[in-house]
Image (cartoon, helix red, strand yellow):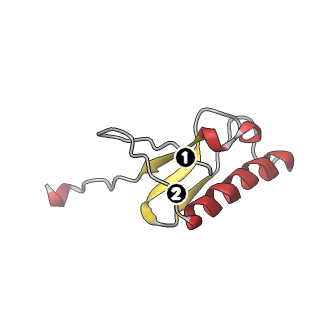
Amino acid sequence: MMYFPLLALLGSAVAAAPSPNLKQAATDLLDANHILHFLDVVDAFGHISVRNPDNSSQFIMSFAVAPALATSQSLVTYVYLQSISKSSR
């Protein structure tokens, strides 16, 4: 069973077993990284991300590695923060 590290912005990382949808999204993301690098669509500095299918305010991408070298251990989850408009202050 694969577990993916979470990048927590204002707290500690949460360890939880990923859902089947999240596992498939992570597998697809790794495949996309390797395929797009092989086809020269991205270079060593490119990145590919996917939204978390269980939480649309999060997205997953590899951390600090070239797409060709992405592994399940290099995947992190980022939280999308909406910008605050001037009218909502």
Are the residues flagged by discs 1 and 2 in contact, CB closer than 8 Å?
yes
Reading the image, the residue beneath label 1 is 4
Identify the residue at image location x=75%, y=45%.
Answer: 42
Identify the residue at image location x=73%, y=35%.
Answer: 44
Q: Assess disc 2: are there few (<14), some (14-19) or many (≥20) residues with their C-alpha within 10 Å of its C-alpha.
A: some
CA distance separating discs 1 and 2: 8 Å
The amino acid pointed to by label 2 is: Pro
Q: Assess disc 1: are there few (<14), some (14-19) or many (≥20) residues with their C-alpha within 10 Å of its C-alpha.
A: some
Identify the residue at image location x=29%, y=40%.
Answer: 10
Asked which quadrant contains residue 26, the reply is bottom right
* Residue 87 percent coordinates (x, y): 17, 60
The one nearer the camera, 27 or 58, is 27
SS under mark 1: loop
- 89 vs 39, left or right, is left
**Earlier along the polypeptide chain: callout 1 or callout 2?**
1
User: Considering the image in quadrants, where does the C terminus appear?
Assistant: bottom left
* Residue 77 percent coordinates (x, y): 49, 48
SS under mark 2: loop
Quick one: which residue is furthest to the front in this view? 1
Q: Which mark is residue 18?
A: 2
* Residue 27 percent coordinates (x, y): 68, 56
* Residue 14 percent coordinates (x, y): 39, 46
